Image (cartoon, helix red, strand yellow):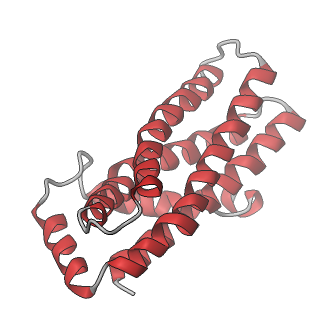
Amino acid sequence: MDSIYVQLLQDHLNIQRALDNFERLLEEMHCAGRDASTLELIMETLDYIAVYPDQWHHPIEDLIFSHLLGKGDVEAEPVNRALGDHRQLLADTRRITELFYAIANDCAVERDQLYSAAKEYIDAQRQHIERENTEVFPLLEQHLASTDWEQIRTQLLERPAPAIAPELRAHYDALQQRVSLPRSSAIA
């Protein structure tokens, strides 16, 4: 397995952990009410979910998926669906983040609206990852040879750097670690 592919799989695990943490924090907030430390961890988790996939993970997948579609003998529907998911998840992430920023700024947000929107968002993220893992990634394994991965690697090196400065990558790697820890460990 190519190292880029392995990194994509690891990214999915990391994002799933962040989603698990987000769901846990959401339940805690639902039971205990608005707590500043819980809200801060939710905001950090959403920051990770918003920035890391959109700046690093999805652009790499987009390039790989386009390469895959160029092979010609690949079932295009699941790949195109995943590409469409990336655009939809970007919009969904912005919407859910705005709701939590409103709460952080003491704006009134209907509790049921917040929790149902957050649950739908978490479900959409999980479904996307599951679809990629079960429908698209097997196509990568089946259709991409080592020469394809080398071409992809070259294309990645030739493309412009992400909009976020490279030093912030370390920040998001550390943030991923923090938001994936159980609550008692994350606060310490």
Q: Is residue 104 above or below residue 39?
A: above
Q: Quadrant of the N terminus?
A: bottom left
**Residue 30 placed where, x, y %?**
84, 35
Q: Residue furthest right?
A: 31
Give whichever of 149, 12 is nearer the camera. 149
Residue 69: image quadrant is: bottom left
Residue 117: image quadrant is: top right
Report the residue at 38% width, 58% height from top: 57
Residue 70: image quadrant is: bottom left
**Residue 47 placed where, x, y %?**
49, 43
Report the residue at 63% width, 53% height from top: 126
Q: Residue furthest top?
A: 108
Give whichever of 174, 143 is nearer the camera. 143
**Residue 60 placed where, x, y %?**
31, 60
Give whichever of 115, 83 is nearer the camera. 83
Give whichever of 158, 26 is nearer the camera. 158
Q: Quadrant of the C terminus?
A: bottom right
Q: Is residue 172 left or right of residue 132?
A: left
